[in-house]
Amino acid sequence: MNTQFVKNNLLQHYWYQHNKECKTPEEIFNETHMDLVREGGKWLKSTSNSCSVVTALITTVVFLASTTVPGGINDSSGMPILVKHLAFTLFSISSLVALCFSIIALFLFLTILTSQYQQKDFRGYVPRKLLLGLTLLFVSTGSMLISFCAGQFFLLKSKLKDMALPVYTMICSCR
């Protein structure tokens, strides 16, 4: 229940009237819901703290993976040796997506942790920021998994080449 709901359900002339204690309906609503705002703020900080730790770990792992070139670099041309393989392209793109999204998610969670919450923030600003951060965290996790599978493909290239795709598909469908 929020202030806007109460405001929409009250007759307009009641909204600006004062009671015996000289308080408007909005002031009464804000006072009676302060505990809810405080508890919501605690939950939000706890959730953002946990998510920011996970996101920082993902960012670290993906940064290290994205700066590593599978197969090495050709000394004469300076280009990656495996640049013409589809798995290399998949590895590169998914590493970049995972890195960018995890950094953005980390910043979102840190802004949630450092902000002061007011009742009006819970109407749309804070939930949208949390939902966007969680979405980016899940996308970066999925991209990291794709990057890992593409990198593993080079290791399994000579052995189990035909079994790699079915195994990866089965593993991804089990989560």
Image: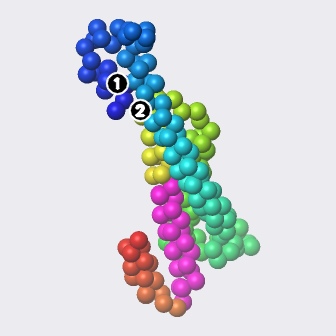
- Packing grade of label 1 (10 A; few <14, some 14-19, many >=20) is few
Q: Residue 171 appears at what percent x and percent y? A: 43, 77
Q: What range of the chain is rendered magenta? A: 137-158
Q: Earlier in the sequence, mark 1 or mark 2?
A: 1
Name of the residue lying farthest toward the right: 75
Question: What secondary structure is the stretch in magenta mostly built from?
Answer: helix
The residue tagged 1 is 4
Mark 2 lies on residue: 123
Q: Nearer the viewer, residue 136 or 151?
A: 136
Give the numbered dot on residue 79: none
Find residue 32 and report its image quarter: top left
Q: Residue furthest bottom?
A: 159
Q: Residue at x 51, y 62 (%)?
A: 141
Give, as a three-letter code, the residue at label 2. Arg
Secondary element at image label 1? helix
Residue 108 in view: no
In the image, residue 70 sits, relative to residue 11, either above or below, namely below
Quarter of the figure that contains the C terminus: bottom left
- Badge 1 amino acid: Gln
